Image: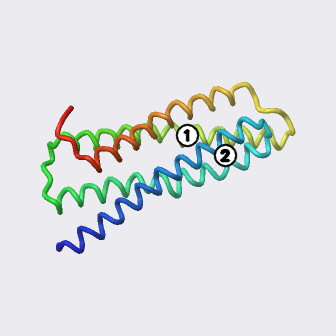
Amino acid sequence: MGSMTYFVIKLIHITSSTILLWTAVGSAFFMILAGRLRDVDLIHQTARFVVIADRVVIAPALLLQLGTGCTLVYLAGFQLMDFWLVSALGLLIVAGACWIPVMQTHTAMRNMSAEADKAEHPLPDDYQRLDQRWMMFGTVALAAIGLIFYLMVFKPHGL
């Protein structure tokens, strides 16, 4: 594969990482806003769209990052045991492992808010526990993604 292939793969990698990061940030922003307003219908509609974003944008972007990243490592001839590369892969695994419970929690929040909205009841107390859970896992995932950006740009050799 030639250098043009490398740059096309790199463009896809950078674009998908940007989409991943900002979709996650946007989803978090709207979930936080809807939750603070305590409007059950707004929370339900927001959670509905966030679940779609989780499944249609964020999860595939994480997988695309892994595929394009491995391809770039191969094409560029990077050493597989380079500190920055091992660290980035570890952080991608952390982000993915955190995103699984985030997606499950968003789905539970969507379902819980749908039931409350349909019954015209306030959100149950368990909703707050779910809100805290996704915030905890989501914060770790976003921090991991931010650190991956740092590693990709600066490629440090060690701490």
Q: Mark 1 = which residue? A: 104
Name the quadrant containing residue 11.
bottom left
Residue found at the very far right of the displayed protein:
120
Question: Callout 2: helix, strand or loop?
Answer: helix
How far from the left and from the top, in percent, is residue 35? 71, 37
Q: Could you say where residue 19 lies in the image, as x and y percent from the top left?
A: 47, 57
Q: Residue at x 67, y 28 (%)?
A: 128
Q: Earlier in the sequence, mark 1 or mark 2?
A: 2
Colouring mode (rainbow / by chain / secondary structure / one colour): rainbow
Based on the displayed image, in which of its 4 quarters is residue 121 positioned? top right
Residue assigned mark 2: 47
| Residue at (15, 53) in percent of width and height | 78
Task: Give the structural element (helix, strand or loop) at label 1.
Answer: helix
Q: Residues within 10 Å of mark 1 (few under 14, many from 20)?
A: some
Left or right: 143, with 29 as reference point? left
Query: Which quadrant of the rendered structure holds the C terminus?
Result: top left
Q: Position of residue 147 (x, y in %)?
A: 36, 40
